[in-house]
Amino acid sequence: MNLKIENPPVTLRELCLDKVRNAIITGYFPSGKRLVERTLCEELGVSRSVVREVIRYLEAEGLVEILPNKGPIVSLLDWEIASQIYEIRLLLEQSAVADCTQNLTDQTTQQLQHLLAELEQAFAADDINLIIATSAKLYETIFTTAKHYIAWEVVQRLNGRISRLRAMTMKSTKREISGYQRIKNMCEAIYLHKDADKAKQAVAEHIAEAASVAKNILNS
């Protein structure tokens, strides 16, 4: 007997969660904004129970915080928080790209090439939601090929805040090299040059520049 559900339906809660998460990540709901249940119910066309469930999920992701006597607000994002996220990313991503290079297969190479092509199109279309989604798939491929499953779980728990920073910095004109080109350099070091040290250096350069851009934005 096959009990597997093929193409499970997306629930109303999941749809609402994606909508509100994207609104926070892209800055439509800015830092500190109060998330009023009644207003969200009207905007989303759902019940309060769905909105409350969505807020609980976003709180767990670090995108929402509950203030006494004020209720839920969009979490504040300052440089102190952002710098810690970049430090964690640097450690986890450098280790992942090194082991991904060692475990490289033809299938991984094809996946990375395909995702890079999709990412290039997303940048060309200036579609921030697609950029974020495709970037996540690409990094998941790297981490799973590296067999860094626990590290990827950590990244996923931080993903809301990582995506928020990514949306803030990816299209910045302050970058010397585009976010897409930085990721392309990292991937080509893995599958074209098969050089773990070069891949780790590409990660360091990518995160250093993103962190610098984020610091200027958050401290301005």
Image (tube, rainbow, N blue to C red):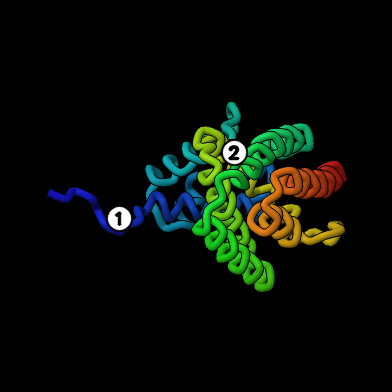
Question: SS at mark 1?
Answer: loop
- How many dots with numbers? 2
Q: Residue at horizontal 63%, vertical 71%?
A: 121
Q: Which mark is residue 8?
A: 1
For image coordinates 70% across by 60% down, the residue present is 184
- Check residue 39 in the rendering and tell me which mark sits there, or answer none: none
Residue 116 figure quarter:
bottom right
Residue at horizontal 56%, vertical 66%?
114
Q: Image quadrant of residue 7?
A: bottom left
x, y percentage for residue 8?
A: 30, 55
The three-letter amino acid code for the residue at tag 1 is Pro
Q: Residue furthest left?
A: 1
Using the image as rendered, state which of residue 144 and residue 73 is in the foreground: 144
Q: Residue 110 appears in which quarter of the rendering?
A: bottom right
Instruction: Indicate which disc, 1 or 2, sits on the residue closer to the N terminus.
Output: 1
Q: Is 163 or 121 nearer to us in this picture? A: 121
Q: Residues within 10 Å of mark 2 (few under 14, many from 20)?
A: some
Residue 30, given in percent of the width and then of the height, sits at: 68, 49
Left or right: residue 217 versus residue 40 is: right
Type of amino acid at the residue the image marks with label 2: Leu
Residue located 71% across and 38% down the image: 90
Q: Position of residue 29 (x, y in %)?
A: 63, 51
Q: In this view of the protein, which residue sits in the foreground, 10 or 97?
A: 97
> Is residue 55 rendered to the left or right of residue 193?
left
Q: Identify the residue under disc 2.
A: 158
Whether residue 207 is visible here, answered yes or no, is no
From mark 1 to mark 2, how far is it between C-alphas? Answer: 25 Å
Residue 23 shown left or right of residue 175 in the figure: left
